[in-house]
Each structure stands twice: as C-alpha cells, then as structure tokens.
C-alpha cells in the first residue's frame, strides 16, 4: 500500500486551518497541524529549523495576520508573517523538493473594476494587509516554482466567528443592523474550500501558480447580511431585527484600512481544471446556518 501523503498545516487554529484539519484528519492523508506555538512566522530565523523537525511532503500555509485594520497598525508583524515568511517557507520547500500551497487574498486587487477578477488581472493593493499578501505571493512563487497560491475571499464557517455570525448576534440583541453597501466580494464557506483544496491536493499535484477559489456570487456586505437574516428567519432563529440597512465605507469609523470596492473572484480556471462548479454563496451560507441550528 502506498504511504499516505504527509501534510504539514500551518495556521491550524485559524478559521480555514481548522476546517482543513477537520476534513483531512479523517481522510487518507497524514496531517501534522501547527499553530503559532509550534512556529511563529514573525521569527524568520526559526522557520528552517522548525520545518526540519517534522517530515512532510506538502506544506500548506493558512497562517497569517488576517485582521485588515490591525495590519495597518502592526505593520512590521504583518510584513513578517504575510510577506517574508511565505518566501522563506517556499525557499525551504524548493530546497527540499516539497510542494507548497499558500493561501492568499482578494485584497491584492485594487477593486476598481466591476467584473469578476481572474488570476491574470492586474494587482494593486489598497492597504497594508493587501500589500503584504501580494508580496507574500510574489516571494513564494519566485522562490519555488512548485508553489500553488490560492486566493480566497470573505471566509465564513464554524471554527471562528465572521461576518454572518456578527450580523446574527447583532440582530438577536438589537433592533437595528447596518452594513456596508459599497464593497462587493464572494463569501466563501471554509468547509467548501477544504473540499476543493483536497481535490487539488489529490488530483492535481502538478498544479502551480495562482488560483482563485470562492463560492459563486458577488454581494455587498449589506446583501450578505440581509441574506443571513432572511435564512435565519426561515430557519426559525429568534431575531429582534430582520432588515439590514446600508451605509457607505466612506467615514465608517471602525475601518482603519481602505478597502478595495470590487474584489469578487472568477473561479473559471479552477472549474476548467477540476470540473467542480462552486455552489452559490447563498446555498453555502444556508448550509452553514442550518448546521448552527442543529
Ligand atoms: N478571513 C477572510 O475573510 C479571508 C479573506 C481573504 C483571504 N484570507 C486568507 O485566508 C487565510 C486564512 O484566513 P483565516 O480567516 O483562517 O484567518 P485566521 O482565522 O485569522 O487564522 C490565521 C491563523 O494564523 C495564525 N497566525 C497569525 N500570525 C501568526 C504568526 N506570526 N505565526 C504563526 N501563526 C500565525 C493565527 O494564530 P492565532 O490563532 O494564534 O492568532 C491564526 O490561527 C489567510 O491567509 C488569509 O489572509 C482570509
């Protein structure tokens, strides 16, 4: 019998990392899951020695500083973990002939157009988070040709609260819910991403370069929030508020970082490669909300 593929997963305590771990640990893969305590990506001098300590065939990096506003303030930490570390991880993989899958973001784009974004579209980050994610992609792809950079967007899922959870909590506690109405992207279910990545791992071991992965659709935050409340109402969840009103990003006090307006991703490259058509974000959101109410 063939030996199982050995995966080393970084960011295993994060929203996506937990989803990957949950699925892969019950598969035929062998998974070693690391959080920050096993390897702190802001310590570049420790990366190589840490990776030496465990055998693996494929490194998946789902770790990074992901709070967009925090990245504006903790600039050095953001640069080290999101930009410098991916290059060093890729260098290690190149030197040891290992495959590298690195998770990146739709925020590498300026978001000024209105069409779905393809892998070949020009980048141009609007904030430090996006810049560090772009720098990380470039460094990884330069250091190691056998790197697959997977750009994802607006993650939600059971492992860590995100936008729909915040909307639900607010609607349970308050009469009024509001969300941004001039920023569009593609909500993505972490469990769906885990399945799609598993297909890439199992059936497309040679695939490298850039790849966009998300559920289908391009709502604003307001539409995303309204759909969350509509589904919750249908599922009989008790709510005080049933409507999400809209406001613009301009002058929205909690946002320290400028957001790119249109960053919904085009997944046709993934679809052509795998034959998988990502389900609409509304269906994925409903599956997630149903799982919460069970
Ligand atoms: N969330 C989104 O909507 C979104 C959108 C686009 C792209 N992405 C990308 O998707 C990937 C996964 O995102 P996510 O939502 O799962 O993020 P997350 O929940 O914030 O998880 C990131 C993980 O990285 C770890 N981490 C942060 N700094 C680290 C460091 N210096 N050393 C080691 N580990 C560190 C965190 O550890 P602690 O738990 O110890 O803090 C956390 O567990 C990231 O690459 C992100 O840029 C996310």
Image (cartoon, grey):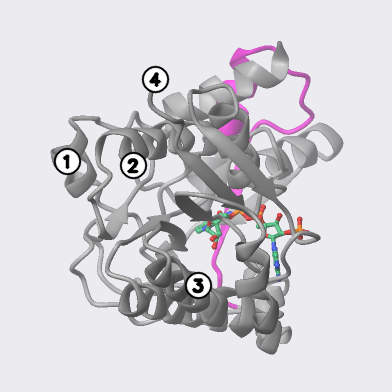
Gap in angstroms between the C-alphas marked 1 and 3: 25 Å
The quadrant where residue 271 appears: top left
Q: Earlier along the polypeptide chain: callout 4 or callout 2?
A: 4
Q: Position of residue 222 (x, y in %)?
A: 53, 48
Q: Earlier along the polypeptide chain: callout 3 or callout 4?
A: 4
Q: Position of residue 141 (x, y in %)?
A: 33, 73
Gap in angstroms between the C-alphas marked 3 and 4: 33 Å
Gap in angstroms between the C-alphas marked 1 and 4: 28 Å
In the image, the residue with mark 3 has its CB under 8 Å from the nearest atom of ligand 1: no
Q: Earlier along the polypeptide chain: callout 1 or callout 4?
A: 4
Q: Which residue is mark 3?
A: 86
Quadrant of the drawing holding the C terminus: top right
Front position among marks 3 and 4: 4
Q: Position of residue 264 (x, y in %)?
A: 34, 55
Q: Which residue is mark 2?
A: 217
Which segment is the magenta one? 228-250
């Amino acid at each position: 019998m063939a030996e199982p593929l050995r995966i080393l997963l970084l960011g295993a305590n994060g929203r996506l990392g937990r989803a990957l771990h949950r699925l892969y640990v019950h598969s035929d893969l062998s998974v070693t899951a690391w959080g920050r305590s096993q390897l702190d990506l802001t310590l570049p001098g420790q990366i190589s020695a840490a990776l030496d300590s465990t055998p693996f065939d494929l490194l998946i990096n789902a770790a990074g500083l992901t709070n967009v506003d925090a990245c504006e303030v903790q600039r050095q930490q953001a640069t080290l973990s999101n930009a410098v570390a991916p290059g060093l991880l890729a260098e290690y993989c190149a030197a040891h002939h290992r495959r590298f899958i690195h998770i990146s973001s739709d925020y590498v784009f300026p978001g000024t157009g209105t069409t779905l974004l393809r892998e070949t579209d020009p980048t141009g980050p609007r904030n430090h988070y996006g810049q560090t994610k772009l720098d990380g992609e470039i460094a990884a792809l330069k250091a190691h040709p056998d790197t697959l950079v997977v750009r994802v967007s607006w993650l939600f899922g059971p492992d860590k609260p995100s936008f729909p959870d915040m909307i639900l909590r607010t609607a349970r506690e308050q009469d009024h819910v509001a969300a941004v109405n001039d920023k569009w992207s593609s909500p993505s279910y972490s469990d769906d991403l885990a399945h799609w990545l598993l297909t890439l791992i199992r059936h497309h071991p040679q695939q490298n370069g850039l790849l966009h992965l998300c559920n289908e659709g391009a709502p604003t935050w307001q539409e995303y929030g309204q759909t969350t409340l509509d589904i919750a109402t249908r599922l009989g969840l008790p709510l005080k508020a049933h409507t999400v009103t809209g406001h613009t990003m301009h002058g929205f006090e909690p946002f320290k970082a400028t957001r790119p307006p249109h960053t919904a991703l085009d997944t046709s490259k993934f679809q052509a490669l795998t034959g998988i058509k990502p389900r609409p974000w509304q269906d994925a959101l409903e599956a997630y909300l149903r799982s919460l109410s069970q």
